Each structure stands twice: as structure tokens, then as C-alpha cells.
Image (cartoon, rainbow, N blue to C red):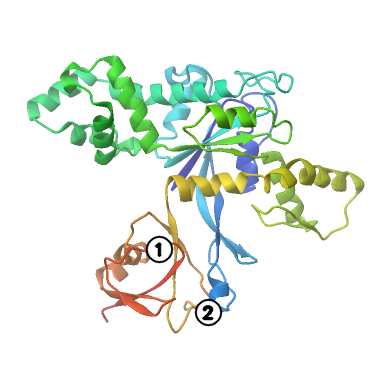
Amino acid sequence: MLIGLLGKPSSGKSTFFKASTLADVEISSRPFTTIKSTEGVSYVKVNCVDKEFNVKCNPSYGYCLNGNRFIPIKLMDVPGLIKDAHLGKGMGSKFLDDLNEADVLIHIVDISGSTNAEGNQVNIGVYDPIKDIEFLELELDMWYFRIIKKGWDKFSRKMQQENEEIKKALSKQLSGLKVTEEMIEISLEKLNLPNFLSWSDQDLLRLASELRKLSKPMVIAANKIDLSNENLEKLQKEIKEYKIIPCSAESELALKEAAKHDLIEYIPGDSGFKIKGNLNENQKSALNLIKDKVLSKYSSTGIQDVLNYAVFDLLKYIVVFPGGVNNLEDSKGRCLPDCFLMPKNSTALDFAYKIHQDLGDKFIKAIDVKTKKAVGKDYVLKNRDVIEIITKK
């Protein structure tokens, strides 16, 4: 799974990326600080199952804090996009193509209105962030349109000659964007387009837009909420198509850095923190500002909420733990060491193959460890299931 971060320059993408990954990236208020796409590891947060079994888990990857399991996901920070990025302006077409494999997108928007369309600083509230959403939608649609349009005449004639279904042919052409036959079928039914041989550029653009929305679902991170929240209600009222989550990447980064240096106890996504180290007056003041301007108003910095929404609400993934009815430990003595993100409607057999090819090939049955009931290969997994796989000897 790959989550793409995108937006105009100086919207706070690199701060969001660093706050999510603690990767060593340059952060600056000047445009085009990020000049190439960067990948890192972030985490989604779920309730661990260890307390239900009265044990303490020992993750082999990710980590667990006070019953909160953090599962790694891949995050990509794409350099700031500007108008006509799809035409290559500011290397935009290259940066967009870096997102080919993205499963979901997070659009970082400067909700405070303190950066203009080019990413230059202006007074707070001067710039309307709705323009950023409209601009990015157009760039993404035109990106898909460019790919579909390339060689369309030759492509459509070939489909006619070979009598191939359009959904099959198009899914092959757009497979690099993770467009499926089902997505194409849904889009064609919704748009009610004429025969593909008579499609106009406007028809192709409408199709490109629908396929983009299905293959690259998006959430809006209303960043810099600590500077101003005057635009938030307006944005949430006027932009109905996307979930808009208020956040402060700057605050999240400060809290994680403080926790890293044992100054505070902080669990990402929580509404508060506990001071544990000796803080100077500047540090106390900074933390109090975060508490007053962000945590007390929005119950979190919003960063974890955005990541969780992208994975669990937009992509609808679930979390499943391998385990045994009589033993929750692996061969190294680690308790509940693993948990996996699985697509919706995954089965027990899918889970077996996810763990290891041999488990899938030798699958006999599975056991729901919580209920101790045997289930078959077609059993549809539920979120936070603990499953034991029984195989042939």
C-alpha cells in the first residue's frame, strides 16, 4: 500500500511527512524546498487485541503503546505542484507520474490562507484555500486525461479491429494507475457515454475524472489549523466530495520530537500528553500553545486521523492478527508479533497466503481464536480478528 502526499508548494507537505515518519527531510517556508519525491514509513493506529487475551504484545514490526497498535504503511511526499503541472510545468508531469502506484491520496491544504497559488507567503487569510482544491482536482484529471488521450485514435481503432471490450482494453492501458475493469464499468455506466469511436475530448476528460476518483480516492488535510481556523467551516460547507480533517503538522512534529527526547509521554492521535522531563520556559510555552490552539479544540493534531481515514475509511482495509488458540507466541517467544492490513472482503484463505505461500497451498481450515470456532477458507475476515491457520502435515 502506498499513500501519496501532494499539494502546492509550502502547504506543509514535508512537515506532514516528517511528523508522520520522523524522516530527516528539509522543511522551509520557501517554495520548492522538496525537489524530488521521497518515500518513508508511517503508521496507522488500531486498538491492539492483547488486552482481550490479558497479555502484552511484542511486535516484530511497528510498535504498541498502551494498547494502541501502530502498523507500518508506506508514505510518499511529492514535490509541490503548480498550475499546468500535467503539462510538465515545474517538473509536474514527472511528480504526478511518481504517484502512479499510489492507492490513496492526501491533499495537504494550507487552511490558514497564508500561502498563495505559487506557495509564496502572504498574510494569514488573504488566499482562499478552496482554490487549491479546485486547482489540484483539475491537474489530477488532466494527468489521467493525458495518459488516456495519448494515442487514443490508434488505440480505439485497434479495439474495434480486435473486437475487444473497452473495459478490458482500457484497464490494460491504465493498469499502471491501478485502474481496474470494475472501475471502468462503474464509470461508463455513470457517464452514459456514446460508442467509444465517437468520444470527444470532453468525453475522455469526464471519463478520466471518474477513473481518477475511483483509483486515487482522496482526503483533504486542512493543515496549519494552529495559525487560523476561519476557513475551515467554509471549506467543509462548500466542499462536499471530500472529507476535510483539520490538522497541524507542525504541532504533531513538535510533540513527537518532545516524546523522542523523553520530555513528554505522547501517543500519536491522542488529545493530550503528559510532561515527564525537565522543560525550560520556551518548551513549556510551546507545548501549552499546542494544547490550547490544537488539542483542546480538535481533540488531536489531526495527522493520525488523516492517515487512519485514508486507510480504513477510503480504502476500507481491516487489521487481522495471526495467532494460535493455545499459543499466541511465535518461535522466538514474541507474543502477537504480527498483524496485517487486509483488503475488505478478504477470506481466511487470502490471509493464509498473505502470511506465507505454503500456508495457503496447504490450507485445511482456520480457527477464530477469539471464539475458538473453526471456519472455512471462504470465511470473510472481520476487523481485529485473530486467526490460526491449520495446514496439512
Q: Can you tell which quarter of the image residue 86 is in? A: top left
Residue 201: image x %, image y %? 29, 15
Which amino acid lies under the numbered mark 1 shown in the image of this protein? Answer: Lys
Residue sitting at 73 percent across and 55 percent down? 260
Residue sitting at 56 percent across and 60 percent down? 62
Residue sitting at 52 percent across and 19 percent down? 90
Residue extending furthest front? 237
Residue 360: image x %, image y %? 28, 67
Which amino acid lies under the numbered mark 2 shown in the image of this protein? Answer: Gly
Q: Earlier in the sequence, mark 1 or mark 2?
A: 2
Judging depth in this view, the residue of 236 and 356 nearest the camera is 236
Residue ID for mark 1: 382
Residue ID for mark 2: 333
Residue 214: image x %, image y %? 36, 37
Residue 3 in sight = yes
273 vs 168, left or right, is right
Quarter placement of the C terminus: bottom left
227 vs 147, left or right, is right
- Closer to the eye: label 1 or 2: 1
How many residues crowd around disc 1 within 10 Å: few (fewer than 14), some, or many (20 or more)? some
**Could you say whether the residue bearing mark 2 is in a helix, strand or loop?**
loop
Q: Which mark is residue 11?
A: none
Label 1 – label 2 distance at C-alpha = 26 Å
Residue sitting at 76 percent across and 52 percent down? 258
Residue 35 in sight = no
How many residues crowd around disc 2 within 10 Å: few (fewer than 14), some, or many (20 or more)? few
20 vs 253, left or right, is left
Circles 1 and 2, Cβ within 8 Å, touching? The answer is no
33 vs 184, left or right, is right
**Could you say whether the residue bearing mark 1 is in a helix, strand or loop?**
loop
Residue 374: image x %, image y %? 32, 78
Residue extending furthest bottom? 326
